[in-house]
Image (tube, coloured by chain):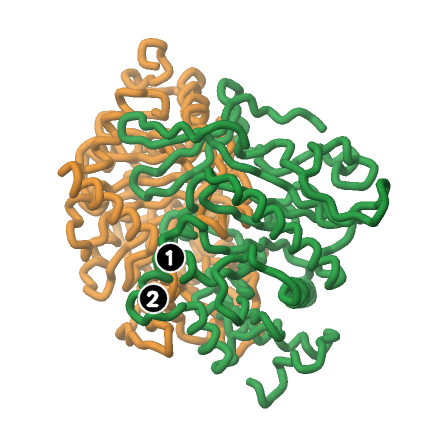
Chain colours: A green, B orange
Amino acid sequence: MTPHPTTHEPELRKDPILGRWVIIAGGRGQRPNPFRRYTTAVPSAAPCPFCPGQEAETPREVLRYAEPGPDGAWRVRVVPNLYPALRIEGRDDKRGEGLYDMMRGIGAHEVVIETPRHDEDPASYTRDHMAEVLTAFRERTLDLLKDSRFQSILVFKNHGPAAGASLQHAHSQIIALPVTPARIESEIKGVERYFDFRGRCIYCDILKQELHDGRRLVAENADFVALAPFASRFPFEVSILPRAHEPFFQTLAPPLTSTLAEILIDVLRRYKLALKDPPYNYVIHSAPPGAQHPERYHWQVELLPKLTEVAGFEWGSGFFINPTPPEEAARALRELDRVMDVPEGHLLASPDRI
Amino acid sequence: MTPHPTTHEPELRKDPILGRWVIIAGGRGQRPNPFRRYTTAVPSAAPCPFCPGQEAETPREVLRYAEPGPDGAWRVRVVPNLYPALRIEGRDDKRGEGLYDMMRGIGAHEVVIETPRHDEDPASYTRDHMAEVLTAFRERTLDLLKDSRFQSILVFKNHGPAAGASLQHAHSQIIALPVTPARIESEIKGVERYFDFRGRCIYCDILKQELHDGRRLVAENADFVALAPFASRFPFEVSILPRAHEPFFQTLAPPLTSTLAEILIDVLRRYKLALKDPPYNYVIHSAPPGAQHPERYHWQVELLPKLTEVAGFEWGSGFFINPTPPEEAARALRELDRVMDVPEGHLLASPDRI
């Protein structure tokens, strides 16, 4: 792997007006290269560093699920990112410079290599295999949370170059941060506002209303519901929520590991069929352990196909124009029941339901 | 122009957790098409509707700057968007549906056709021509603000397909909204927080600190300063701020119209040279007239070249990784002084300055 032009400490900087933290991760003193990204980029001619036989090309693994025996083939590996956006060592060294606040960019940045097969598509995983990937997310989250410097753990996947994946071999990423990201903080505030007024979880109430209404449902099983959010920013946005109130993703345990794997594969297959194998991202939202009332939060998976370019209007205003009503997106995804092998009792497109 | 598949009223929906408004602008009852966008898209084989001679292809103009005489050639035209994301007629009809809040998608959506020349690049405008474009922004903003239904006016430009422009002919857009966008609301809150504590404008203090520090300066003239923000989310982000405290863009008047035109062209030329003609967006941020203390705000222009794909991590968390420190971006843009025809007294890269 070609060395990456990172020579300086990454830095966390706080926007003095918006209060939003940003990682500034560039190579100080070098020519700026705005086109580089902090992912796992390698020249495409090189052998894939995530394939079996190339294990020496990644840092030493922090987790491995493998067949029995000392030389058992691995099924899932987790390794530190070779070009991390954050550094694991040291203290945060919070400081100011006039108006500005910053700290050292400490944190963890790991890569989950989801499969040994270079071309395998997550939409084609078996349920057991996806369950093992989800278990890896949980195990790494639990381990990283032992480090009291970390305020939040983000687990996310970029699928396809347009969604930010620079290697084709299926992988996802885990980032541990010494701060709480802006979006998560806004969510916590919204949850608190509702709880203070009504004494209930807003996500539980949304689930109840959506299950009754039916127009925005995409798929469901015994433990999870996939729906198109009422105020979706993007076409075909989907959220997967556990039916039972639970603030932390990392409490995920059987049988929910398996039912989450099932519904996640189901949604990815619907995307693939309806949207012609789109690039997409998903992000797991879980309560930051240091929140005042983390027990009021309701964890969830947010899925975002990348179908349109986001324009200046959206960036500059935080105001989004979504050309596809979530009711239409949900119907299109739901109607694939007909062509998919959907387990009985999970059919949503039946006329009595909608 | 091919009719656009919009058959239903656009709707404004509020995210019940984040409090963020979204325009849902799709064609209800039709097959969803997630790839359509609410810009000014036309099939590329059709004649350009923004070129002279094609005026009948756009709605009737609401503003026109032209040579004298009844048949004088126009230099700038403003027309309603043929496929608006919002409708100008009617009342907002605010209502709820269980947990959810929505209203009719009323508002205005206009297109500023900046030049009669199909291939003209804004980086090549004369100062007088850019000043006329800015005057059109101001005139339309003032006119739209007469309508008391509108809480905020957004003026923005998408340049290049990757930045959301679906027509090559240089144009920008104006959107009037019955709500305040999330980002503007967060800015106002940040400005208020600082004012309550210090009794001063945070942007005025930032300008003072940046002018003294120098490392993030990109360009300056008598009335404006262009700088790379300390906590930039994206590589080569630039903000242009008026030196004098002023909350409203629409108060812009000579000689500031001309000095803003000058510095805006200057930054666009630097982008073109340093970043090889990148796609970019710019957005004008101005105090919403209905804010509690609009006079505390400081208007500005935010410029965002579109150089990297935004990945799931960013979308899901609101937490951005910027691989190019703003000090590096500013230096690269500043150093172009050497190859550009920069007016004397505006040189920033001189050794005594930095």
- Residue B28: x and y, percent? 49, 76
Kind of residue at disc 2? Phe
Q: Looking at the image, how many numbered discs can be counted on the residues? A: 2
Residue A168 appears in the rendering: no
Left or right? Give the position of A121 relative to B168. right
The answer to whether residue B203 is above or below residue A162 is above
Q: Secondary structure at mark 2?
A: helix
Q: Are marks 2 and 1 in contact (CB under 8 Å)?
A: yes
Q: Nearer the viewer, mark 2 or mark 1?
A: 1
Measure the C-alpha gap from mark 2 to mark 1: 10 Å
Q: Of B20 and A201, which appears nearest the observer?
A: A201
Q: Residues within 10 Å of mark 1 (few under 14, many from 20)?
A: some
Q: Which numbered circle lies on residue A195?
A: 2
| Residues packed near mark 2 inside 10 Å, few (<14), some (14 to 19) or many (20 plus) | some
Towards the viewer: B180 or A105: A105
Of the two numbered discs 2 and 1 on the same chain, state the one appearing first in sequence: 2
Residue nearer the viewer, B157 or A103:
A103
Chain letter for the residue marked with disc 2 in the picture? A
Determine whether B13 is above or below B238 in the image.
Answer: below
Q: Residue at x 33, y 42 (%)?
A: A19
Q: Position of residue B220 (x, y in %)?
A: 29, 25
Q: Which residue is mark 1?
A: A293
- The residue most toward the bottom is A352
- Residue B43 in the figure: left or right of residue B100: right
Residue pictured at 43% horizontal, 31% vertical: A92
Q: Amino acid at mark 1?
A: His
User: SS for tag 1?
Assistant: loop
**Residue in front for this viewpoint, A203 or A214:** A203
Q: Position of residue A188 (x, y in %)?
A: 38, 56
The subunit carrying tag 1 is A
Q: Position of residue A184 (x, y in %)?
A: 43, 52
